[in-house]
Image: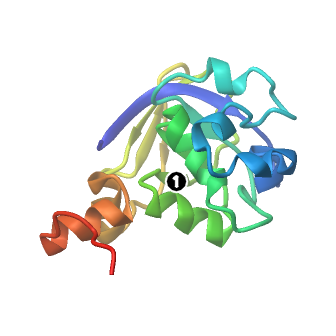
Amino acid sequence: MSVIRGRAWKFGDNISTDLIVPGRYFHLRSKPKELAEHAFEDINPNFARSVRRNDLVVAGENFGIGSSREHAALVFKILGVGAILAKSFARIFYRNAINLGLPVIMLDTSAIEDGDLLEVHLDEGVVIDVSKNLSLRFKPLPKFLLDILKAGGLIEYVIASKGVTAFHEV
């Protein structure tokens, strides 16, 4: 997971959780795969059916503002998005993404354009815009967050680190 290579899907500032997953589909929250089919429907109707595994969502300031629904991060994981790059994130969205095993990287995304081929080197703290032969540095994630991401999410991390084989109902 330390290198993620994919195409950029560029969005602007203040992308809310309602733009990521329109509220009118709230009734699908127990059917996350169906919910994912509506990701970004109001700003790019082709996104959910056109995004490919490891493609990267790139945005400006305040990505994930709005409600604290973890479904907004979950739909990206279901669709196979490799990471989300933005100038800044809403705090709850950021933690939801990490907890689900979805990398979120804060850096200046101004030079990245829609469709650029990108490589994200999580361990080194660099994004390479292959289309432009440009390197963009970011502050590497702390080791404990990288460990959560490498495990596939917080639940998987806890299970692996505690030697738990399954959760049992009490």
Q: Residue furthest left?
A: 163
Residue at the disc numbered 1: 105
* Residue at (67% x, 51% y) in the render: 29
Left or right, 160 with reference to 54: left
User: Which colour assignment does the render follow?
Assistant: rainbow
In percent of width and height, residue 73 lies at 60, 52
* Residue at (58% x, 53% y) in the render: 107
Q: Residue furthest front?
A: 170
Left or right, 10 with reference to 118: right
Q: Taking 141 as reference, is 84 above or below it?
A: above
- Circle count: 1
Q: Residue furthest bottom?
A: 170
Q: Amino acid at mark 1?
A: Ile
* Residue at (58% x, 64% y) in the render: 94
Q: Is residue 154 visible?
A: yes
Disc 1 crowd, CA 10 A, few/some/many (<14, 14-19, 20+): many
- Quadrant in which the C terminus appears: bottom left
In percent of width and height, residue 130 lies at 47, 23
Secondary structure beneath label 1: strand
Q: Taking 69 as reference, is 126 above or below it?
A: above
Left or right, 65 with reference to 36: right
Q: Quadrant of residue 43?
A: top right
Q: Nearer the viewer, residue 14 or 149?
A: 149
In percent of width and height, residue 1 lies at 30, 42
Q: Quadrant of residue 28?
A: top right
Q: Nearer the viewer, residue 68 or 28?
A: 28
Q: Is residue 15 visible?
A: no
Q: Nearer the viewer, residue 12 or 99?
A: 99
In percent of width and height, residue 96 lies at 55, 64
